[in-house]
Amino acid sequence: MIVVADTSPINYLVLIGEIDSLPALYESVVIPEAVFNELQADETPEMVRAWAIKPPDWLTMSPVSILLDEIYLPELDEGE
C-alpha cells in the first residue's frame, strides 16, 4: 500500500523516534515537494531537518500538478 503524507505525521514520527513505523506499515510513502520543503524550513526542529537531508528509499517526493485556489482553501498551508 502507498500512502501520501503531509508534514505533521513525518515531523512528529521523527521527533518521537518512530519514523521507521511507516515502512513497516506501508510499501511507500509519497510527499509533495511542499512537504519536503517544510521539513527543511528554518523553524522545523533540528532533528527533523537532519533526517530530511537524506530521506530513506521508501520516501518519494512528487510535484503537485493541481493548483489549489486560495479562495476556497485559505486556511491550508501549501504542504497540506
Image (cartoon, helix red, strand yellow):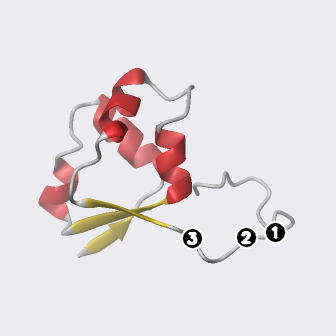
Tag count? 3
Q: Which mark is residue 72?
A: 1
Which image quarter: residue 45? Answer: top left
Helix or strand or loop: what does disc 3 sit on? loop
> Residue at coordinates 67% horizontally, 51% vertically from top-left?
77
Residue at the extreme right of the image, as rendered: 71
How far apart marks 2 and 3 lie (CA) works out to 10 Å
Residue occupied by mark 2: 68
How far apart marks 3 and 1 lie (CA) works out to 17 Å
> Residue at coordinates 18% horizontally, 69% vertically from top-left?
27
Circle 1: residue type: Tyr
Tag in front: 1 or 2: 2
The disc, 3 or 1, on the residue closer to the chain's N-terminal end is: 3
How far apart marks 1 and 2 lie (CA) works out to 8 Å
**Residue toward you, 58 or 22:** 58
Rendering coords of residue 56 (x, y %): 22, 50
Q: Tell me if 66 is positioned left or right of 45 in this view.
A: right
Residue occupied by mark 3: 64
Where 16 falls versus 28 (above or below)? above
Q: Tell me if 35 is positioned left or right of 59 in this view.
A: right
Helix or strand or loop: what does disc 2 sit on? loop
Q: Which mark is residue 24?
A: none
Rendering coords of residue 13 (x, y %): 30, 40
Rendering coords of residue 50 (x, y %): 34, 29
Estimate how packed mark 1 is, as few (under 14), some (14 to 19) or many (20 or more) residues with alpha carbons within 10 Å.
Answer: few
Tag in front: 2 or 3: 3
**Residue toward you, 8 or 66:** 66
Residue at the extreme left of the image, as rendered: 24
Badges 1 and 2: C-beta atoms under 8 Å apart?
yes
Circle 2: residue type: Leu
Circle 3: residue type: Val
Helix or strand or loop: what does disc 1 sit on? loop
